[in-house]
Amino acid sequence: MHGITQRHGGTLDLLVTSEDTSDVSVAVDLPCVISDHALVVADLPIRPVRVCPTPQVVRGWRSVDRVALTESVASSPLGRVPSVDTPADELFAEYDRVLR
């Protein structure tokens, strides 16, 4: 479907799908109702993906000794400025290791 999606003309709003997606129902409401853009509504053939919840351990912040935590982080590698050559994945791994 092609058409104007902005009151002053032109197509400013796009709906892009993969080439194997077919039979997409698209409705375009005229601009000027609420905005100078049209409302574009599409009915896409998408199946929801079920995600199994993962167990989490949560600690209460009130029970954390903030002074000890501050000292511990400051004396760890996180308390020093990293080298500009250190890759981001190594920095994230170090952050994760120290805070665990």
Image: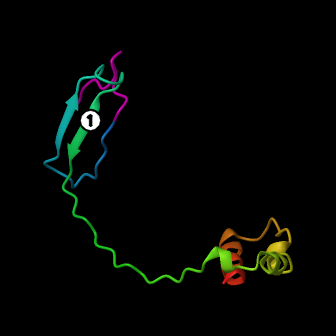
Q: Along the horizontal axis of the image, is 82 left or right of 37?
A: right
**Image quadrant assignment for residue 9:** top left
> Looking at the image, which residue is at 28% across and 73% down?
50
Q: Along the horizontal axis of the image, is 43 left or right of 99?
A: left
Quarter that holds the C terminus: bottom right
**Image quadrant assignment for residue 58:** bottom right
Residue 27 is inside the magenta segment: no
The residue under label 1 is 40
Residue 92 seen in the figure = yes
**Magenta-colored span:** 2-13
> Looking at the image, which residue is at 85% across and 75% down?
74
The spot of residue 93 in percent (x, y) is 66, 78
Out of 16 and 39, give the one closest to the viewer.
Answer: 39
> Looking at the image, which residue is at 69% across and 80% down?
99
Out of 39 and 88, give the one closest to the viewer.
Answer: 39
Residue 1 seen in the figure = no
Residue 10 is inside the magenta segment: yes
23 is higher (above) or lower (below) than 90: above
16 is higher (above) or lower (below) than 11: below
Type of residue at label 1? Val
**Image quadrant assignment for residue 68:** bottom right
The spot of residue 55 in percent (x, y) is 44, 84
Circle 1 Cα neighbour tier, 10 Å, few/some/many (<14 / 14–19 / ≥20):
some
The spot of residue 37 in percent (x, y) is 34, 26
> Looking at the image, which residue is at 71% across and 70% down?
87
Q: Main secondary structure of the magenta part?
A: loop
Quarter that holds the N terminus: top left
80 is higher (above) or lower (below) than 35: below
6 is higher (above) or lower (below) than 81: above
